[in-house]
Amino acid sequence: MRTIQGVSVSAGIAIGTVRVLAAVDYAVERRLIDDPQAEMDRFRAARDTAVAQLKQLRDNVAAEFGENKAELFDAHRLMLQDPDYAECVEGLIAQDKVNAEFAVKSAAEQFAAMFAAMDSSTMQARAADVKDVSRRVMNVLQGKRDSTAQDGSVQGDAVQNGIVQNGIAQNGESHIIFAEDLAPSDTAQLDRAKVLGLVTAKGSANSHTAILARTMGLPAITGIGDAFDPADDGHVAVIDGTSGAVFVDPDEATLTEYRRRKAEAEEHLSLLRKLKGKPTETKSGQRVHLYANISRPSDAAAVLANDAEGIGLFRSEFLYLEREDWPTEEFQFDAYGQVAQEMGDRPVIIRTLDIGADKQVDYFNLSHEDNPALGYRAIRICLTRPEIFKVQLRALLRASAYGNIAIMLPMITSVQEVRDAKRILEEAKSELRGERIDFNESIQIGVMIETPASVIMADELAAEVDFFSIGTNDLTQYTLACDRQTPSLERFADPHSPAVLRMIQMTIEAAHRHGIWCGICGELGADLSLTDTFLRLGIDELSVSPTSVLPLRNVIRNH
């Protein structure tokens, strides 16, 4: 057995035979031409044909996956129609007297290099897109038919070694695809019935190819680099799209374990098919919004796959914890914006920085504390180091122009903390207005209720914000005076304690008195033994791990 570690871009397990896609040679002959105008006309005609092909591909994707997923190919069409792109191609033809194919390839390399050099990971991922659309134009210029041809013919780079596009099988088998890289247009045309999963040497979690893989529900791993070996063709492999692990020629123990996991996942999928699209509503008509918790942008795929209605807690601190230096505004904007776009109209509630206590980051240079759980953490850091806080708030506001984002403040103990945070938020808004940068002016603000102080002050806090979300992990710790990081206190830290449940009840009642909604985003939200209690208390929203969404919906619908 050979074990390879890559980067997870789409969750799920696939077990099957590997089919390696040979690398495609995009070498284009450089020819000197006598009539630049005729060559420009060739380019324009090929570009128009490519635009029409993308329109067809866009319509195919929209029909199968929805309008929001088809927007990628609208962006591809705009890329081809961009005046700067055309000017670059035609300039090369006119100045260097070269053929259109070579000019398109050269222009693609220039634009791809420009995107790759940008600080933004989202913009870096666009390098693959400009290569993809340029390749399409080159194919037209070279007389190659596209796989989206109206006559149903199946051709193109992804149709190799029995791969299927547009529902036409080249053979009867399903495979795990190994490739150097896959273009978004190739990925969109793969037949999910014939492709079990994807593994690529290159690529990123931010690429449109990765987003499409998640949309299609294909387990996918990227970034295996030099471990990519064409000799794996025909071998059995297991891919774990959650951990990013690939097992080529797996031993019997590995196969047995992953078959068990896959069976569990299929049982879960059966539940999904039964409950997908169904409202989270009791038999008596009580409606509860069922959201999911995430820690990274790539987790959004699991939210959609499990049919959660939104994201109730995006733990933004992981953008800090997984770096060795401060995440820039642009880096954070990319992360938040990616999730917002992927979620479409569904709410995305992003918790502001919650560093401190058990989540330490070296570059914050926080002083040692004897009791960090009661120390310098979360909103306390943000309010005393506003230069850090404002960077995050600017990124959140900018991302709010791309989806339904709300901001949630952690570890609140007083009304003044909320007002101070809102003041810094208003400063960030004012700066963005001055820079003519779009954002949602009416972005919602909420607070996490996770201290006894915030419960006691809930009536006053409700007058300042749009919603409450109860963090039951910390609320249990602070209510019962039991450090949740101390194993010996586990028997005393009972989250089912009447004191904790009364705190939850008081919070819900205060929220409803003031006309705002109240949810739970801590672990208790997924505790099925308490679902009946939360329904009786009138909870409006529950946010749980993505895999807990469907079992919880099932319980609520049968209540």
Image (cartoon, rainbow, N blue to C red):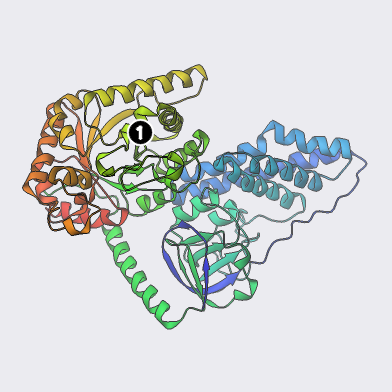
Q: Is residue 102 above or below residue 514?
A: below
x, y percent for residue 503? 11, 40
- Decide: is 223 above or below 498: below
Could you tell whether 483 is left or right of 223 in the image? left
Badge 1 local density, few (<14 within 10 Å), some, or many (20+)? some
Question: Which residue appears farthest toward the right when viewing the image?
Answer: 34
Amino acid of disc 1: Ile
Expressed as whole percent of the image width and height from the top left, the position of residue 335 reads 46, 41
Q: Going 27% across and 26% down the picture, which residue do you hit?
A: 417
Left or right position of 314 against 497: right
Q: Residue furthest bottom?
A: 252
Dot 1 lies on which element?
A: helix
Instruction: Find residue 242 and report its image quarter.
Output: bottom left
Please say whether residue 162 is visible from this viewpoint: yes
Q: Quadrant of residue 91 in the image?
A: top right
Whether residue 186 sits left or right of residue 542 in the image: it is right
Toward the viewer: 37 or 319? Answer: 319
Residue at the location (55% across, 78% down)?
235
Label 1 belongs to which residue?
381
In the drawing, does residue 84 fall left or right of residue 176?
Answer: right
In the rendered picture of this protein, how many numbered marks are placed on residues?
A: 1
Q: Looking at the rendering, which quadrant does residue 517 occupy? A: top left
Residue 173 in view in this figure: no
**Could you tell me residue 447's position as x and y percent?**
26, 33
